Amino acid sequence: MALVVQKYGGSSVADAARIKRVAQRIVATKKAGNDVVVIVSAMGDTTDELLDLAQQVSPLPPGRELDMLLTAGERISMALLAMAIANLGHEARSFTGSQAGVITDSTHGKARIIDVTPGRIREAVNVGQIAIVAGFQGVSQDTKDITTLGRGGSDTTAVALAAALEADVCEIYTDVDGIFTADPRIVSAARQIPRISYEEAMEMAACGAKILHLRCVEYARRFTLPIHVRSSFSSREGTWVVSDPNFEGNVMEQPIISGVAHDRSEAKITVVGVPDKVGEAAAIFRTLADAEINIDMIVQNISAAATGRTDISFTLPSADGTVGVTALKRIQGQIGFEKILFDDQIGKVSLIGAGMRSHPGVTAKFFGALADAGVNIEMISTSEIRISVIVGQEDVDAAVTAAHRAFDLDADQVEAVVYGGTGR
Amino acid sequence: MALVVQKYGGSSVADAARIKRVAQRIVATKKAGNDVVVIVSAMGDTTDELLDLAQQVSPLPPGRELDMLLTAGERISMALLAMAIANLGHEARSFTGSQAGVITDSTHGKARIIDVTPGRIREAVNVGQIAIVAGFQGVSQDTKDITTLGRGGSDTTAVALAAALEADVCEIYTDVDGIFTADPRIVSAARQIPRISYEEAMEMAACGAKILHLRCVEYARRFTLPIHVRSSFSSREGTWVVSDPNFEGNVMEQPIISGVAHDRSEAKITVVGVPDKVGEAAAIFRTLADAEINIDMIVQNISAAATGRTDISFTLPSADGTVGVTALKRIQGQIGFEKILFDDQIGKVSLIGAGMRSHPGVTAKFFGALADAGVNIEMISTSEIRISVIVGQEDVDAAVTAAHRAFDLDADQVEAVVYGGTGR
């Protein structure tokens, strides 16, 4: 008997009708002979509605109380889902993060899981019950206060519980069929990826693909837990995220590029005229770190010998733009740079593929495709299995489309690959 | 330093504006030099909305899951209230029933409190924090599942916590100024009662006065905990519920009748032609008890010697009418009674007053007043400090008004009493 962990997001349980449909899918999985543990997010817009209420009573609510408030969302969806399953004649029990043994640190709003002790979940499963667990939430080890895990928290709950329960698979249900080679809203010829490695899925998550969160894939990789990303609206196979996507009969040649990701949520700050002295860049990035801003790409121009000054550009989440600029202006006198430029009309386009390790010339081909499409590159950053460029936001669609076609990812180009080797 | 426990109902925290106003009142109490523990209900219609959602996914949801669902309501209101207090510069922490140490049995939907271990609340108060506790909920001793206390549960939470914390007073905030001599919507001359005994408040609760629930007053009496019922919309003194309302300088003569209560939520069943044999009535009421129906008043006519048969009438909550009639029809053959009559167009009017103990003739005066008003009495029931009659539902207003005037309760009749002896 396999143990299947399923995670359903907010759009899958947005109303009573959807909750009933999800209940049917869960019962079908149980009837197929599996033990089932389900992680569920808050219904549709519940979290936003609760945040709005919080804003109405306090402009800056304490983190502990905000977490207490938001965790009401999953409490509602999980109880309703357990009722819907009971109504189908199967026994289901809902558990809060705390009851499920999701132990975290005390960082309200973005707590990290430090232990999972799912004794009550195991007991429920052992007596044949379907366990429904609130995603996104836990309880702090030190203060016994309720915490939330922050963005992507429900996926992380699912993977962490699946790992602790030694589940056979963690199924992440979403409103699309899986992970695609590019956003189908931009590239109509984009294909669903049947299998992908943890490393590639992590790069895609980091580069703006919204299906899986980085933390959740990191967690799964650490425990070599297979993730199956699939649609809650169909029974089709989705995308398997595994250690070695070419294992088990998937013998056809690995594509060089697995997918093209893009991200419009970043902005660029350029610090102009930084004195080219030891420690100036460090002071800039220390200031940003103290403001809790995560920097993505960094480019430093070669110092113009004549002036002894250099420009430093970096990207950061657009939402942090104001805080970042303000923090830097505060140290302008101390550093002595000339000015700050801020640009939130940028986009990041990334090629991801483990195959590029063994294929030289990927960068040249990528840049050539962008040049042919008339797209100007502002910044470049690479890893072993990724190449990212910053372009003007208006060029993102053209860049994604050009890259997708240049690397033979369009559906008409690779039909044999697409429909071979799915499944597990 | 006094310890004040305050309870705010759903209408007091129905929206963000009201939550902020309640926060101001709490902070004022704290600033006046008191330690403050607050019990809060779910916002306005939240509970009804959650029940509606439950009905949409399951016609008969399991009690455990329904409790899990409904407890989300107080979680939302308590977190928002804590935020609003924090926004006023005071430290507040919210606690679920479980965190506050409200230990119950496992009867989902109407759990009974079996222990209160408010260690975390004491700790919070000791370091100067305002503790906000979810009303209506607890955790079962045996299964560690979340439970709810049923109707009036938040009041009971407040009194139970106040008793366990040895609070100086439990303030119950509501949307009226206190307990009245009659429902002001019926008797415009009704007055607010400044002080009332536990026993009278219990009789009033049992007879349909909606301000305080029976369980909560019972609990307060057991611990001799003073309850102060008052309005969350004004700072006026409300009604004190205490052991001896004539103590401490309230030396004026006690009124014979403290108040007139009424209740339109009951129905009457008459079992016609019951064979007048030992055990027949017992069989009828055993059947109703097995159906978990609470019987209120019972009248058995004197047996007609000629027929050897008798009629048995009793009242029960209207909502249980169908279940009661069905249960009785099932034993009709066994008992051999002739037929069942069901009437939900009745009302109960009750006089309550510890003073009637020492004043003979109350019953005669009450019945005389009803007769003068043209009200026919269908059933009668009495206790040491109460007389209740069942009348036609259309006669309830006339009966309440007549009784209120007959016992000199109208405001113009007793002004001296009303405005004397308030406070504590």
Image: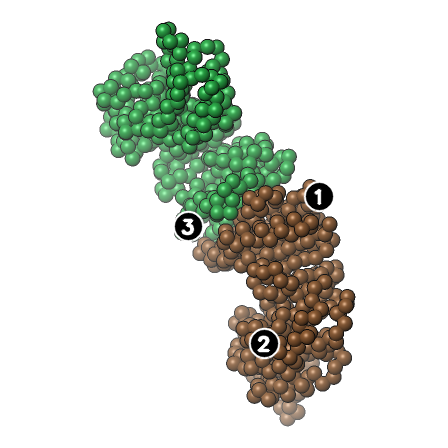
Chain colours: A brown, B green
- Label 3 CA crowd tier, 10 Å (few <14, some 14–19, many 20+): some
Q: Which mark is residue A126?
A: 1
Give the amino acid at mark 3: Asp
The x and y percentages for residue B305 are 37, 6
Residue shown at 75% from the left, 76% from the top: A253
Q: In terms of secondary structure, where does tag 2 sit?
A: loop
Q: Tell which of A382 and A307 is nearer to you.
A: A382
Determine which residue is flagged by label 3: B15
| Mark whose residue sits in front, 1 or 2 | 2
| Mark whose residue sits in front, 2 or 3 | 2
Q: Is residue A44 above or below residue B213?
A: below
Identify the subunit bearing mark 1.
Answer: A
Give the amino acid at mark 2: Ala
Instruction: Note whether residue A118 is visible.
Output: yes
Residue shown at 49% from the left, 13% from the top: B279
The x and y percentages for residue A256 are 71, 78
Q: In terms of secondary structure, where does tag 1 sit?
A: helix
Q: Where on the picture, by quarter, is residue B198?
A: top left
Dots 2, 3 in contact, CB < 8 A: no
Q: Tell which of A289 and B271 is nearer to you.
A: B271
Q: In terms of secondary structure, where does tag 3 sit?
A: loop
Give the amino acid at mark 1: Asn
Q: CA distance from mark 1 to mark 2?
A: 46 Å
Identify the subunit bearing mark 3.
Answer: B
Instruction: Note whether residue B24 is visible.
Output: no
Q: CA distance from mark 3 to mark 1?
A: 44 Å
Determine which residue is flagged by label 2: A189
- Label 1 CA crowd tier, 10 Å (few <14, some 14–19, many 20+): few
The lab-note entry on whether marks 2 and 3 share a chain reads no
The quadrant of the image that shows the C terminus of chain A is bottom right
